[in-house]
Amino acid sequence: MKNSILSILVVACAVIGSVQVASAAGDAKTPRQMDWSFSGPFGTYDKAALQRGFLVFKSVCASCHSLDLIAFRNLEALGYEEGQIKNIAAEYTVMDGPNDEGDMFERPARPSDYFPSPFANTAAAKYANNGAYPPDLSLITKARKDGANYVYSLLTGYKDAPEYVQLMSGQHYNPYMAGGVIAMAAPLSDDQVAYEDETPTTADQYAKDVVQFLNWAAEPEMEARKRMGVKVLFFLSIFALVMYGVKRKIWHDVH
């Protein structure tokens, strides 16, 4: 009898716990809806924004987050020339080898290399970030629902925690994060990154530009895909008209 009661209590606690977790996961604020140049069937990337966003990523985000699926040579799509790409790659070092003596060694990155992780391994990344693992950003706008708007809202949504939210050391309040608690401090602030053009250097503009870049990183083939989609729809429309004409001709002869 005691065992039965204990089992019921255990199950009840598990159910209550799961409900609380589900509630915490579902109380994130709905992301702000922005008007992105890449939205819609005819959307395109703004190359100037992509370059600014890459600068923000390189200057701010890359200190904690990796970009595993992007090679330096892919930056050509952002409008960079071969010499510029070589210079950008040379700012990084990558592990290579083994050499003739069987040892691994570091060398300056080449355009064919992928962006190296800022940490040697997962344990090092967690240790440097109070136990939280910074996710790879290659597919972040595809991995999250309403990804572009979510990332923008998260970057610009930091606030002082309300009284009912208890934060531990190293935690911050952001209503766009599930549960409202996030380990990453607000990464962007005004005048943090210098732009070469006349674009305002505000945290809001940084967030817009880096979202442009991260959306390109997640889907660099988007423009080609949309162009192909338009061509296919045009072809199907013409084909439908031709087949309709054939159908009318056939049935006209039958009648």
Image (cartoon, rainbow, N blue to C red):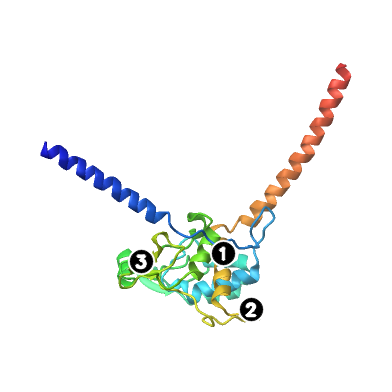
| The residue positioned farthest toward the top in the image shown | 255
Which quarter of the rendering shows the C terminus? top right
Q: Amino acid at mark 2?
A: Thr
Of callouts 1 and 2, the N-terminal one: 1
Q: Which mark is residue 156?
A: none
- Between tags 2 and 3, which lies in front? 3
Secondary structure at numbered mark 1: helix
Q: Position of residue 143 (x, y in %)?
A: 48, 55
Instruction: Name the residue nearer the viewer: 41 or 220.
Output: 41
Mark 1 vs mark 2, CA separation in Å: 24 Å
Q: Position of residue 184 (x, y in %)?
A: 40, 70
Q: Which mark is residue 164?
A: 3
Residue 154 visible in this rendered orientation of the protein: yes
Q: Which mark is residue 199?
A: 2
- Between tags 3 and 1, which lies in front? 3
Q: Are marks 3 and 1 in contact (CB under 8 Å)?
A: no
Quickly name the residue at label 1: 74
Q: Amino acid at mark 1?
A: Asn
Q: Is residue 36 above or below residue 41?
A: below
**How many other residues sit within 10 Å of disc 1, few (<14), some (14-19) or many (≥20)?**
some
Secondary structure at numbered mark 2: loop
Of callouts 3 and 1, the N-terminal one: 1
